[in-house]
Amino acid sequence: MTLPRPVLVVDYGAQYAQLIARRVREARVYSEIVPHSMPVAEMLAKDPAAIILSGGPSSVYEPGAPQIDAKLFDAGVPVFGICYGFQAMASALGGTVAHTGSREFGGTQLQLVEPGVLFAATPTEQSVWMSHGDCVTAAPAGFTVTASSPGAPVAAFEHVSQGFAGVQFHPEVAHTPYGQRILEHFLYKVAGIEPTWTMGNIIDDQVALIRAQVGDAPVVCGLSGGVDSAVAAALVHKAIGDQLTCVFVDHGLLRAGEAEQVERDYVAATGIKLIVADEKQRFLNALAGVTDPEEKRKIIGREFIRAFEAAVPAETRFLVQGTLYPDVVESGGGTGTANIKSHHNVGGLPEDMQFQLVEPLRTLFKDEVRSLGESLGLPDAMVWRHPFPGPGLAIRIIGAVDESRLEILRAADLIAREELTAAGLDRDVWQFPVVLLADVRSVGVQGDGRTYGHPVVLRPVSSEDAMTADWSRLPYDVIAKISTRITNEVREVNRVVLDVTSKPPGTIEWE
Ligand code: XMP
């Protein structure tokens, strides 16, 4: 059992390659990202069902601009050029690309010359997202020009019998309303690909791959309470049943109910064998009196490794990790590009732990992991859980961490989560940290008396990937309800403040 023939998305260095690859997956076609520096022979060795040339920052004329090896077009593989990829394709096949001086950035009206195959059943005039300086002024011989825009006389072309098509605009972005349909027309009608990349197929393929990799050896998976490790473990369990043991290190820094959720709901949903290591006291002892955020992280990482090692059954040979495709691409594993970020999914396990890795989510994007979790029958609360940092509440207590401070924060955090859920807004925020300013006190008045309590900060944010974020404009009545409940129900807190900082300059977490 192997993965299906991929649609290769050739990355010309813009931010769009991952988005294009995701859109292809949304069309239920398997995609992979490859760097533009990959030799054509190597691309063809992957037996691609089609190749998509993505946008890029360069001008075709710039010295050093990535060129396309014309051999790509002789291989009988369908090719779709987007933006820079469209111009590079035009230029390689004998069309003309010119520096006309008419640049287009942002929303533009596209005028169809004729719908052809790409634009079938879409309006004669439609909005598209453009980002170009140069433009194609003449299509290569044999191509039909299907659309133009004010700044691009040739804004789309196709040569269906050869399997070639291209567009000057970005079909992958949300600002191009018919973009997904246009991309699907290329995949299904120009390239003749069947949409078979479904959750059912992914599960069947991965189950077979996992069985082939591990045979009858014992396998372990560290559960963090997060989506990725939960789905990875469920998938491995489906493949090998009780050969898998999960280990959950309860460091006592999770939010109210989360440790119980792992033990109760997850085990009930999957039937997985679970070892729970109750290490709350170990972490509290190690963190006592520590206020520096990086010091907290180091301590938690170190203790986590020790606790995990101690809990893993001695005969274990394989370790499951919930590595996702963006991690693989960004670490250079998918594209051969430089190492941008190294990812340590199990809190940086030491190299002398001699496990072989099982990474069943390596080819998947986050949204696919969530669908997979749903298909595997995991509870909604687990599949749709917001990202939560490994060091947990320890980096949401500004000041030293102790059990009483953790209790205050857990109580306030639970109220914020309950009210967000009650308002039906769980999926409207990326994350909603609640932060306890444990060393700050302010004066308040409650009943007849003066209070001198701690503030908590509400930090709801919207984001695509946590790299940048904006503060979420939650309805005032929801904020008001959270504030009233926290100050009424959590005795030690007498003030609730809202963080209205975007990232940058603020980070999402306060520490
Ligand atoms: P920042 O605060 O840097 O956070 O904007 C970006 C994302 O990363 C999470 N985060 C962490 N996750 N260990 C983790 O596993 C950490 O030490 C850590 N620090 C921040 C944060 O919750 C957000 O999703």
Image: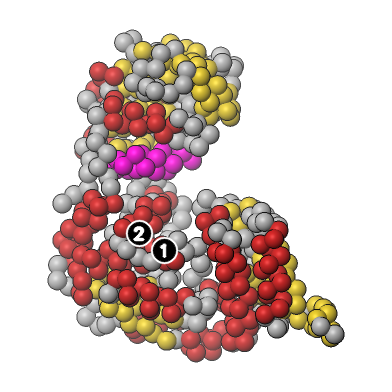
Q: Is residue 23 magenta?
A: yes
Q: Position of residue 435 (x, y in %)?
A: 64, 71
Q: Is residue 281 visible?
A: yes
**Neighbourhood count class around disc 2 (C-alpha, 10 Å): few under 14, some 14–19, many 20 upward:** some
**Neighbourhood count class around disc 1 (C-alpha, 10 Å): few under 14, some 14–19, many 20 upward:** few
Q: Look at the numbered discs 1 and 2 and tell me whether their residues touch, using CB distance below 8 Å.
A: yes
Task: Indicate the amino acid at tag 2.
Answer: Glu
The foreground one among 339 and 153 is 153
- Give the residue at mark 2: 374
The foreground one among 343 and 110 is 110
Report whether 327 appears left or right of 500: left
The magenta stretch is: 12-35
Q: Which mark is residue 290?
A: none
The foreground one among 322 and 459 is 459
SS type, badge 1: helix
Report whether 177 appears left or right of 114: right
Depicted 144 relative to depicted 323: above or below: above
Q: Residue at x 30, y 40 (%)?
A: 29
Q: Is residue 160 magenta?
A: no
Q: Is residue 440 visible?
A: no
Report whether 482 appears left or right of 49: right
Q: Residue at x 71, y 83 (%)?
A: 492
Q: Position of residue 502 (x, y in %)?
A: 66, 54
Depicted 400 relative to depicted 49: above or below: below
Task: Indicate the amino acid at tag 1.
Answer: Asp
- Give the residue at mark 1: 380
Q: Position of residue 316 (x, y in %)?
A: 24, 77
What is the C-alpha distance between the residues marked 1 and 2?
7 Å
Q: Residue at x 60, y 83 (%)?
A: 407
